[in-house]
Amino acid sequence: MIVTMTRLRVVGLKRDLDPTLAALQELGCIQLLDAKNVHPGLTAYVPAAEQRELETLGYLLVRLDALLALLPPQTGLAPEPAPETDLASVLQADLDANAPGLETLAQQRHALSNDADVLPNYATTLRKLSRLTPSMTDLADYETVALLINRRYSGVLEVLEREMRTVAGERCTLVSDQVDSDTIGALLIYPRAFATQMQGLLGRVQVNQVSLPDSLRNVPFADALAHIERRLQQIPGEIAAVDTRLAEAGRQHQARWLAYRQAVQRRLEQLRVRASLGETEHTFVLVGWVPERDVAAARQLLEQRLPQDLVIDELAPSAEEAHAAPVLLEATSVVRPFQFFVRMLALPRYGTIDPTVLMALFMPLFYGLMLGDIGYSLLMLAAGLVGYRRFAAGSGLRDLVYFIILGSIWGVVWGLAFGEFFGSMGHDVFGLQPLWKERSAPDALPALLLFSIALGVVHVCLGLVLGVWQAWRLHHAAEIWERVGMLVGLVGLFLLVGVVAKRLPAGWATPSVVVVIVGLTLLIRGLGPIGALMAPVELLSTVGNILSYLRLAAIGLASVYLAMVGNIMAGRAGSLLVGIIIAILFHALNIALGAFSPTIHSLRLHYVEFFTKFYEPGGEPFQPLGGR
Amino acid sequence: MDIGLLAIGAGLAVGITALGTGYAQAKIGAAGVGAIAEKPESMGRVILLVAIPETMVILGFAVAAMIMLLLGGEGA
């Protein structure tokens, strides 16, 4: 359900503003409104004095967050108090004293990780070239350049050698060899005196040189590989040493900085909400939405903290203002996970129906009906229970898994009704008999289709009834006419179908047509000027909504036939092992589809078929001061 | 009526509507993924939009079931 909200107005002396806001933050149950909108005569609160504090704290928070991100996560930290006064100065001094050392450590850590990532690539390349290097280790005044060239462009080496000799004469050499199937490695050796001309030549030829990292700039090429291998052995130890120092810094600073961070965030929130306050010369005025159940607690705390200095009263909102109130959903723990599915579409508007309970009732039922297999459901249930323990409370994944668990329980119930255990395996191996109908039997189809449509009728009509009730509460006359007309039109159509299917006497045909016409007339009344055109379309569209529930049977049948095909193919494999593999593959595919497809389709039946009859999206989430 | 022709008719009823649904879902899905990349909170609405064309194939299934149940009984 949507929690009932009340508008609370607090008027006090400006000197009491900070303690008032601090108390409201502590309560965490008021979402401030722009007071000038409620009382147009009020002057906007101008937080001139606090503007500098706002900017300073904003900057310090960014610095603090950047430093906290450098520290490894710590557990079991003892909470530390934040300074009561002069938060900005204390924090500034703290950061100035400790940030440089920490930043240096973080830079070292970054450089070492970078080397650990990059040096193995250099080592691989140098290893490829190593077979070319022994002959030139004793060449003192010579410079060496390594090249890696794709085999397709091997012709470039001849060009390069010719050009080198033009530049350096006979005092240069080029050795090359295939280093792998695609690459040719080459070493160019020439006197240092020709270094500039050779670099120019290499630039003109446009070949890729193997360039070594900065740390190896002064290391002779032939020694580079050994140097890299040595560095790669040293780096883990150096990283561990830096990590130890970072962890030590974390133990020293993290708890205190987290406390500062919280204090800064609270103060920043206090400063930012000032823009929504109103003021007179000596007083401030704040107005906000408070859950009705929390009003007494809010009043009590404010009166306790600031006795006789505050005027607190409740303001009755107009219907329009109430419609714009923020939305806080409340539900018992059994149905609360289904709020995830409601939020996934959009929050309902304040004052309308919260469909969470209805989703909790119907979604698992539909899911189970589509799955309808004891074996699959038990596997899904087991996976769901494991997932439920693993995912954090309140996370979307845990809510999803909770739905899968409930759906799987329904899946077992429907599996018993259909006598399915991994498709027909239950019947073939254990002699399992259906309590209602075996879905794969030819005579089961009409019953399944009718049952699906019956569920559709119940669900869609329930949506329409809720729509009528909601429109009644909100005094939306047109919507009442429209939804009542739709219900009456549907009843007429059902009667007509009964007559055509010879379930009702032929004499009922005329009254049925009259009921349809009455329904259409009410629909036209509700839809307004375009009603005559739209009413038949709307009625047929709702019939389409009901027929859409045929998917409950269709998805289930697809699953049954896939399981059946798997079992038949496994039985005809001719070998026990191959048969088991085929069966596992088919049933695994079916389980994967069984987890995904019924979820999406149950969701769709709610979003498209059910919600369109009553649901009013567009609610703004309740975001109280102090964020609870 | 020949049961083979009925089966072909039923198959076409599901198959052609499935193609239509697939075509529509491909277009909506591509746009939807783009929308989710920009606004992750639009996930619910995108699921809703992607699911809308499925009504076509469900109605195709209903027609196929009617062909087999209403006419298949006479043909058999």
Image (cartoon, coloured by chain):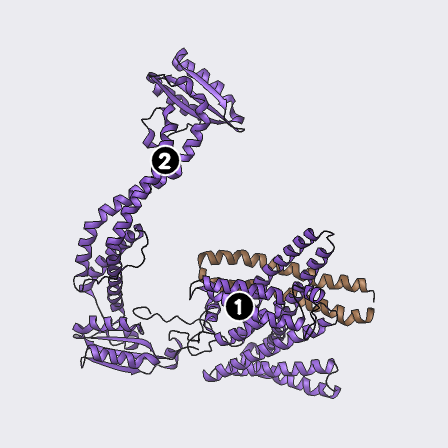
Chain of the residue on which disc 1 is drawn: A
Secondary element at image label 2: helix
Tell me if A341 is positioned left or right of A106 in this view: right
The mark that comes first in sequence, 1 or 2, is 2
- Closer to the camera in the image, A77 or A340: A77
Task: Identify the residue position indicated by label 1 in the image.
Answer: A405
| Mark sitting on residue B26 | none
Residue sitting at the far top: A170
* Labels 1 and 2 share a subunit: yes
Rendering colour (chain A): purple
Q: Position of residue A396 (x, y in %)?
A: 45, 64
Rendering colour (chain B): brown
Q: Mark 1, residues whose alpha carbon is within 10 Å: few (<14), some, or many (≥20)?
A: many
Q: Mark 2, residues whose alpha carbon is within 10 Å: few (<14), some, or many (≥20)?
A: few
Residue A605 in view here: no
| Disc 1 to disc 2, C-alpha distance | 50 Å
Tell me if A439 is positioned left or right of A106 in this view: right
Give the residue at x 69% y 66%.
A430
In the rendered image, the vertical position of residue A526 relative to residue A587, given as above or below:
below
Q: Amino acid at mark 2?
A: Gln
Nearest-to-viewer mark from 1 and 2:
2
In the rendered image, the vertical position of residue A397 relative to residue A179, given as above or below:
below
Q: Quadrant of residue A254?
A: bottom left
Q: Position of residue B53 (x, y in %)?
A: 60, 64
Task: Identify the residue position indicated by label 2 in the image.
Answer: A233
State if disc 2 and disc 1 touch (CB < 8 Å): no
Chain of the residue on which disc 2 is drawn: A
Residue A339 in view here: yes
Q: Position of residue A172 (x, y in %)?
A: 40, 15
Q: Amino acid at mark 1?
A: Ile
Q: Can you say which quadrant of the picture contains the N terminus of chain A? A: bottom left
